[in-house]
Image: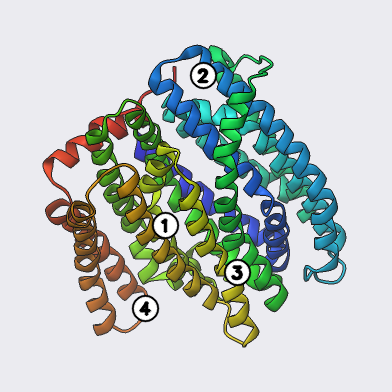
Amino acid sequence: MLYFRMILTLLVSLYTSRLILNILGVEDYGINNVVGGVVTMFAFFNSAMSSATQRFLSFEIGKGDTPQIRKTFNAALIIHIGIAILVFILAETIGLWFVKRYLVIPTGRMEAALWIYHFSVLSFLVTIVQVPYNALIISHERMNVYAYISILEVCLKLFIVFMLTAISVDKLKLYGLLHFCVVFFIASIFRIYTRRHFEESRFMMVRDKQLYRIVFSFSAWNLLGNFAVILKGQGVNILLNLFYGPVVNAARGIAYQVQGALYGFVQNFQVAMKPQIIKSYATDNFEYMHQLIFRGTKFSFYLLFGLSLPIMLEPEIILKLWLKTVPDYSAIFLQLLLVDIIIESISGPLVASVHASGKIKLYQIIVGTLFLLNLPVSYLFLKRGYQPEITMYVSIIITTLTFVFRVFTASKLVYFSKKNYFRKVMIPILLVAVVSMIPPLWIQYHHEAGGTRSILVMLSSVLTFILAVCFIGTNRVEKDFLKSNVLSKIIKRPR
């Protein structure tokens, strides 16, 4: 049932993206992508507090301190309301000025671009205030709630497509309005669920200065790391707009649509594991915590690599089957973005362990600095006339360096052996990757491009990957662990 829901969500998400691209056109789709990206630039405020909220709620739930859970939740809610007000002020002044002054918007589309910008701001404000409610659900490990609501969300996106075709107005303006309505409705459902199931979500005014100080101290260093992540993604998106215009933004947006749909599988898995990692640290159960980190890294890789491999090998045929109009650069962006996100995905359990320790100052300084390099280095290459995909090569190199640093940092903070990590995690991962690619690459080399070759490549990649994971990548204990400790938490019905 779990995989049925996830696959349904994946297929419907990709189908609606295809229809929206068709309805809006490549140019308007690119405008929506880059203008929405400007709003996302302010997300580093929210992302920093989101990580802190998740960490402290999971920590207190692990200790079983109910009064402190309620104080922590309400303190986080008050802080997020303040962040929403700050983001609104910045977005409607600095952000609006940047859109009007610097973005490359085709003649006659500035009014529609501003319309989509304002609704993107409103959608983002709703998302900010919603963070503590989502964090509470995750901390209580009610992952099943996300699975069911995600189905509703993709159904509402299909409704957006229907409305876009049924109403004769500016499609880009209407899309901004309808997207905001969906965001608001989904946030309302989450809020109603938390108020009905978790007593600690009842509002109370918190005046505990020490609690605010602790949360802000943790968040302050998170701010640097999250700001760097935003620049690594949306900053480069704006660079591409300045150098190449909205058509390249559309190609990158298509690649991110596929990446987001695939990464949802891994996110469900990692969201289920993160509270367990934090609670294990809170109770000093380091042996179990190390098992979670090692297995979480392996399973994250297997989930995403298995889904991504056929697409990375045959991106052109996938895009042609999916889209009526395939923007230039879409295939190469998709291939490189999937490589980048696969490397980033195996960092998830390591990041959770660092956050669990609470010792993030040096970690965020170094990770933030590495990610910040992505923007100026990409700018230098684009300035010298390199093609747009050079930005993805830069990102892959930086993501790899960051992963290596995370391994060394996490091993010191939560006391696991680097030697065991590379022996039990990295070697099986690399073996599975190499073995899985040999047969499909052999087929690609010995057969001419075409539909038959694409089918053979994709089928062989899936088959060899499954066999490699079963016989090389996992042992019986890990298979049982995945079934009993993670999937069971996602499959169980909502309460």
Q: Which mark is residue 142?
A: none
Residue at horizontal 61%, vertical 80%?
Answer: 380
Residue 323 image offset from top left, x and y in percent: 55, 64
Q: Which residue is mark 1?
A: 344
The answer to whether residue 189 shows anywhere in this view is no
Real-space Cα separation, disc 4 to disc 3, in angstroms: 38 Å
Residue 233 visible in the displayed image: yes
What amino acid does circle 4 point to?
Answer: Gly
| Residue at 39% over, 23% down | 62
Residue 342 position by quadrant: bottom left
Front residue of 12/368: it is: 368
Residue plotted at (58% across, 40% down): 219
Task: Give the alpha-carbon distance from disc 1 to disc 4, as whole Å.
Answer: 32 Å
User: Callout 3: helix, strand or loop?
Assistant: helix
Secondary structure under the numbered disc 4 in the rendered image? loop
CA distance separating discs 3 and 1: 17 Å
Task: In this rendered view, identify the residue nearer to me: 299 or 170.
Answer: 299
Seen in the picture, residue 360 relative to 59 is either above or below; the reply is below
- The amino acid sitting under disc 3 is Leu
